[in-house]
Image: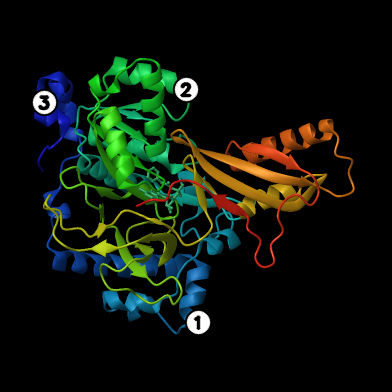
Amino acid sequence: MGNTTKGARSTATKTGAARKPASKRAAAAYKFDAAAETMPRAEISRLQLRRLKASIKNAYDNVAFHRRRMKALGFEPGDLKRLDDLAGLPFTLKTDLRDHYPFGLFARPQAEVVRLHASSGTTGKPTVVGYTAKDIATWADLMARSLACAGARPGDIVHNAYGYGLFTGGLGAHYGVERLGATVVPMSGGSTERQIVLITDFGARVLCATPSYALAMAEVAEKEGVDLRKSKLEIGVFGAEPWSEAMRREVEARLGLKAVDIYGLSEIMGPGVACECVEAQAGLHGWEDHFIFEVIDPDTGKALKEGEAGELVITTLTKEALPMIRYRTRDITRLSTERCACGRTHVRIKRITGRNDDMLIIRGVNVYPSQIEAVLVGLPDVAPHYQLVVERKGTLDHLTVEVELMPNVVPTPELRRVVGESVRHHIKSIIGVTAEVVVKEPGEIPRSMGKAVRVRDLRPKLN
Ligand code: DLL
């Protein structure tokens, strides 16, 4: 693969020393697997069919939910003869995970599950996902492959500002960096001034972060008089939220790096389901030896032709603990099997342009309005009328939650303060997002004649 990065062009000696891996490590490091990544498409299909049969059998044999649904269709795993037969199976939805909370869709006993992660559910309960040791190893491989595709190399220092914890970003990237044979700085999010000091002092070549946080870092650095364009940063591996070409240009100019888009979701694995190549920066290679990607019309559920925009649906081929059959991601995109300049043959998923549900991504945190509603309903003196206002302030998203007092309370300034603080605290601790809370008089929040307007998203539209 070519090295069309800032370093390859102009700073080869600047980071050259850091790039040479120690020989022992080099032996263990991830190597570009041409056989897997440039496999002829007919061969990808053959591999997918073989793996799909095993994955469907895993789901049928070990998950009552999948077995029940297949039996209802008169379908047995042995009936799957062609890849097209997958289209006859039902979709899996986020609500299916919620209905089987926490472990009901797991295909392995808990003793074989070595890790749990969780993401926002639509109500009070999160969506829980589990991994066997082999799943974690596969994830590390795919994340290493994604990082390499993005231009990272063994021996690099990778500054990982994705959040560690139940969110898959931090640990997902972490294991991938180690698998790549690079050095991970497990920074997580926050403490922006400190992040900038460490990026500079440690000489990170690669930055992993949400694109909006990368921009926030640029802003803080500029304020402090630190020019990150002069740092050793050459590659940004940015994802977990929608972003635009305009934002790519801005972040590249302000940080002095190549910004590459990475995609993933907890239900399928985490980051590393798909990643752009640094050579073309033109759509994310979806790793088809481990997943099947479809795009459907979200209203009819029918498959769309290549190039048509619709909802991305993903089936896992190698997941042990949580096999997913036709998972509706709600993400809107297009697919292209056109050969990429980098030589990789795996399908390209075009930039995600939005979602077809009401999930908001606020500073990288997934938030459903219904989750906020669930918080409000449990609090005293708060009426069930609310509005969420999302704006971009500087480079960061800003959430304001407007709530209303119950008609029977006396709206003293003290009560407003207490209610506001309580709502803010509960939203932060239950959903994990910081919100400004505005407490309004009874009747002040506009009532709608039809569906209530719960969200005013005033952020600039993506191109
Ligand atoms: O966001 C996993 C991830 C971590 C991906 C780090 C990339 C980097 P969840 O928290 O489950 O997982 O959120 C998944 O985030 O369905 C999309 O709506 C959105 N998303 C993720 N990556 C992108 C991207 C992680 N590159 C949800 N562009 C997904 C647009 C993205 N949206």
Residue 10, disc: 3
Write down the residue under mark 2.
Answer: 191
The answer to which quarter of the image holds residue 157 is top left
| Count of numbered circles in the view | 3
User: Label 2 vs label 1: CA separation?
Assistant: 53 Å
Closer to the chain start, of discs 3 and 1, is 3
Closer to the chain start, of discs 2 and 1, is 1
Q: Which element carries disc 1, helix, strand or loop? A: helix
Relative to the observer, which residue lies in front, 74 or 313? 313
User: Label 2 vs label 3: CA separation?
Assistant: 31 Å
Q: In which quarter of the image is the N terminus?
A: top left
Write the residue at 63% across / 58% down: 453
Percent position of residue 455, x then y? 59, 53
Q: Which element carries disc 2, helix, strand or loop? A: loop
Residue 210 in view = no
Number of the front mark, 2 or 3:
3
The answer to which quarter of the image holds residue 322 is bottom left
Please name the amino acid that badge 2 sits on. Answer: Ser
Write down the residue under mark 1.
Answer: 72
Please name the amino acid that badge 3 sits on. Answer: Ser
- For label 2, the crowd category at 10 Å Cα-Cα, with few meaning under 14, some 14 to 19 and many 20 or more, is few
- For label 1, the crowd category at 10 Å Cα-Cα, with few meaning under 14, some 14 to 19 and many 20 or more, is few
Relative to the observer, which residue lies in front, 138 or 313? 313
Write the residue at 41% across / 40% down: 169
Closer to the chain start, of discs 2 and 3, is 3
The answer to which quarter of the image holds residue 182 is top left
